[in-house]
C-alpha cells in the first residue's frame, strides 16, 4: 500500500464509507453485509453513524475490549478479499456486532429494531442511558461529544441519542 493510494482513498471516501465497504465484504452464519449496508444506505434518516466491531464490554473501564482490538489488528494485517473457491484464506475481519448511533425517538428505534429482525441478528439491544452499566457515561458522551453530529448547527436544541447493537453468533 502506498501513501499516494491511501491519500487518494482518504480524499475520496469518508470514514463511514470505508466502514461500509468493510461491512459489505462480510458474510458469516446469518450475517449478510451487503444486505445490511443496502438497508442502511436506503434509510440514512434512521442513523447518524455505525461501527462494525467485536462486542464492547462494560467491564473494561474504557468501554473497549483489548482482546477484540488484538483480533481486529491481526485480521486487518492479514485480510485480502478472496473468492470462496480460493485455496488461500486469510483471517477474516472478526467483527460480529454492529453498533448504530441514532436519535432516541420511538419511531426511529422501532424501525431499527425491525431491521434487526430482517437481518436475522441473534441479539438486538438498545442502550439509551437507562442501563446502569452504560447510563451516565453514555449519556454524558452523547450529549457533549455528539451534539454537532446530531444537530449540525451550533445553538440548536440537543437531541437525545441511543446506541443499538446487533450481534450475530
Image: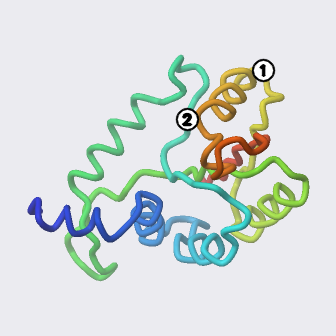
Q: Quadrant of the N terminus?
A: bottom left
Apparent side of residue 145 relative to residue 53 in the rendered image (left or right): right
Apparent side of residue 26 relative to residue 61 in the rendered image (left or right): left
Name the residue rendered at 64%, 55% in the picture: 48
Q: Is mark 2 on a helix, strand or loop?
A: loop
Q: What element carries label 1?
A: loop
Name the residue rendered at 71%, 52% in the picture: 102
As drawn, 124 above or below 7: above
Mark 2 Cα shell of 10 Å, populated few (<14), some (14-19), many (≥20)? some
As drawn, 35 above or below 141: below
Q: Name the residue under label 2.
A: 56
At which x and y percent is residue 42?
66, 78
Name the one closer to the observer, 91 or 72. 72
Name the residue rendered at 29%, 51% in the picture: 75
Name the one closer to the observer, 142 or 68. 142
Apparent side of residue 1 relative to residue 76 in the rendered image (left or right): left
Give the image quarter of residue 119: bottom right
Apparent side of residue 15 relative to residue 155 in the rendered image (left or right): left
Give the image quarter of residue 32: bottom right
Q: Name the residue under label 1.
A: 132
Name the one closer to the observer, 88 or 64. 64
At which x and y percent is residue 135?
75, 25
As drawn, 48 above or below 163: below
As drawn, 28 above or below 60: below
Mark 1 Cα shell of 10 Å, populated few (<14), some (14-19), many (≥20)? few
Q: Looking at this rendering, what residue extends furthest in the front direction?
A: 155
- Give the total number of marks visible in the rendering: 2
First in sequence: mark 1 or mark 2? 2
At which x and y percent is residue 157?
79, 42
Amino acid at each position: 500500500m502506498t501513501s499516494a493510494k491511501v491519500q487518494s482513498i482518504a480524499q475520496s471516501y469518508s470514514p463511514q464509507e470505508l466502514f461500509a465497504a468493510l461491512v459489505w465484504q462480510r458474510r458469516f452464519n446469518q450475517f449478510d453485509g451487503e444486505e445490511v449496508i443496502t438497508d442502511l444506505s436506503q434509510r440514512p434518516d434512521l442513523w447518524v453513524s455505525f461501527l462494525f466491531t467485536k462486542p464492547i464490554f462494560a467491564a473494561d473501564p474504557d468501554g473497549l475490549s483489548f482482546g477484540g482490538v488484538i483480533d481486529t489488528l491481526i485480521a486487518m494485517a492479514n485480510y485480502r478479499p478472496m473468492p470462496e473457491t480460493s485455496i488461500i484464506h486469510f483471517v477474516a475481519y472478526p467483527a460480529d456486532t454492529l453498533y448504530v448511533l441514532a436519535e432516541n425517538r420511538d419511531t426511529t428505534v422501532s424501525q431499527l429494531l425491525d431491521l434487526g429482525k430482517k437481518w436475522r441478528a441473534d441479539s438486538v439491544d438498545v442502550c439509551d442511558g437507562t442501563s446502569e452499566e452504560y447510563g451516565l457515561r453514555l449519556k454524558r458522551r452523547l450529549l457533549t461529544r455528539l451534539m454537532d453530529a446530531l444537530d449540525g448547527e451550533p445553538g440548536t436544541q440537543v437531541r437525545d441519542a441511543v446506541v443499538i447493537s446487533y450481534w450475530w453468533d
